Amino acid sequence: MASTSPLKASTSSVAAAISTEGLHKHYGNLEVLKGIDFRADDGEVISILGASGSGKSTFLRCLNLLELPSAGRIRILDEDVKLRPGRVNLRIADQRQIDRLRTQVAMVFQNFCLWSHMTVLDNLMEAPVHVQRRNRAEVRDEAEAILRRVGLLDRAKYYPAQLSGGQQQRAAIARALVMKPRVLLFDEPTSALDPELVGEVLKVMRDLAAEGRTMLVVTHEMAFARDVSSRVLFLEQGRIAAQGAPRDLFGGGMNERFDQFVSRFNEG
Ligand code: ADP
Ligand code: MG
């Protein structure tokens, strides 16, 4: 047993939502991800911490196939992503599979990335109607229900520029949810917000976590990482330097570099 990889050793009956094995990513000569073995079970909320440049965004972008790794395997909902060898990075072997899996793994960005020329409601409806080809009236009902959940139903007809940053980010989360994804990726969702607007976005994320969603959250919000996540991952120079239950990691003494990293936040 000792020789099996952590991925294969798992005897958990819980399905893996998303996993990687030996994930590497190069940009030219720069090796940004240096072999990441990772597994998120259904319903896990995983906070990903690490200094700027440690590869957090690149990791998330590989997981939702915005970037292709240079080596390694990615499994999404128990399906191997079909990739084939390329010159530097792997290449897509089955575009239809990628398109299908991409809708299962939604991403929320630091800068919201809403379409500025569309109302909030149209932002939500665009992909379900035009990519997923779902029924327009049904999608509208669902979009409105989701907007109500995130407290934005009264802003459905507004354009992004007419909203606060916190409202824009809640709209972006709503837009991710309307695709009915199985995994939600967040890349520093509150980093672009004025401090007084951070709480309203974190509240939405806490609600999603409480509902049992599978979430991977790159964040500098230590309280969120400590109190909401089931597991914390600490990336350093493209490797997982430490991981564990927040209680254990934040308790200190597990990983010196992690302790240093956290103490810098507590000072600031
Ligand atoms: P983090 O999100 O942890 O700050 P990133 O994943 O954004 O880190 O970046 C990790 C490293 O990869 C950095 O050195 C960054 O400059 C580099 N990098 C990221 N994206 C690209 C790119 N498209 N081309 C070249 N280098 C990149
Ligand atoms: Mg980043």
Image (cartoon, rainbow, N blue to C red):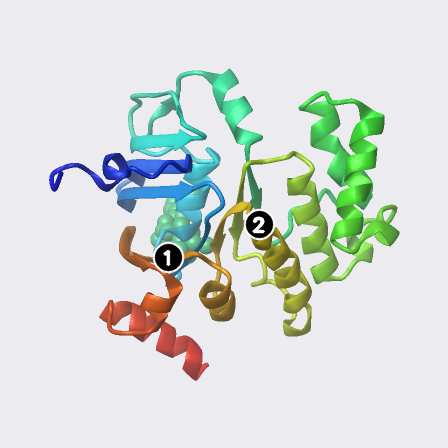
Count of all numbered marks drawn on residues in the image = 2
How far apart are labels 1 and 2 at the CA level? 16 Å
Find residue 229 and name its label.
none
Residue 18 is left or right of residue 228, and the answer is left
Quadrant for the N terminus, please. top left
**SS for tag 1?**
loop
Q: What residue lies at 66% left-to-right and 57% top-to-bottom?
A: 204
Near mark 1 (Cα within 10 A), the count class, few <14, some 14-19 or many ≥20, is few
Q: What residue lies at 70% left-to-right and 61% top-to-bottom?
A: 166
Residue 35 is left or right of residue 65, and the answer is left
Q: Which residue is mark 2?
A: 109
Q: Who comes first in sequence, dot 1 or dot 2?
A: 1
Q: Quadrant of residue 135?
A: top right
Q: Are marks 1 and 2 in contact (CB under 8 Å)?
A: no
In this view, the residue in front, 202 or 239, is 202
Q: What residue lies at 61% left-to-right and 54% top-to-bottom?
A: 111
**Residue type at mark 1?**
Gly
Residue 42 visible, this orientation: yes
Return the x and y of residue 96 as percentages of the image width and height.
Answer: 52, 16
Find residue 53 and name its label.
1
**Residue type at mark 2?**
Phe
Residue 110 visible, this orientation: no
**SS for tag 2?**
loop
Return the x and y of residue 239 as percentages of the image width and height.
Answer: 27, 51
Near mark 2 (Cα within 10 A), the count class, few <14, some 14-19 or many ≥20, is many
Q: What residue lies at 49% left-to-right and 45% top-to-bottom?
A: 43
In this view, the residue in front, 265 or 66, is 265
Determine if the C-beta at disc 1 is less than 8 A from ligand 1: yes
Residue 266 is left or right of residue 125, and the answer is left
Determine if the C-beta at disc 2 is less than 8 A from ligand 2: no
Return the x and y of residue 244 as percentages of the image width and height.
Answer: 32, 58
In this view, the residue in front, 9 or 32, is 9
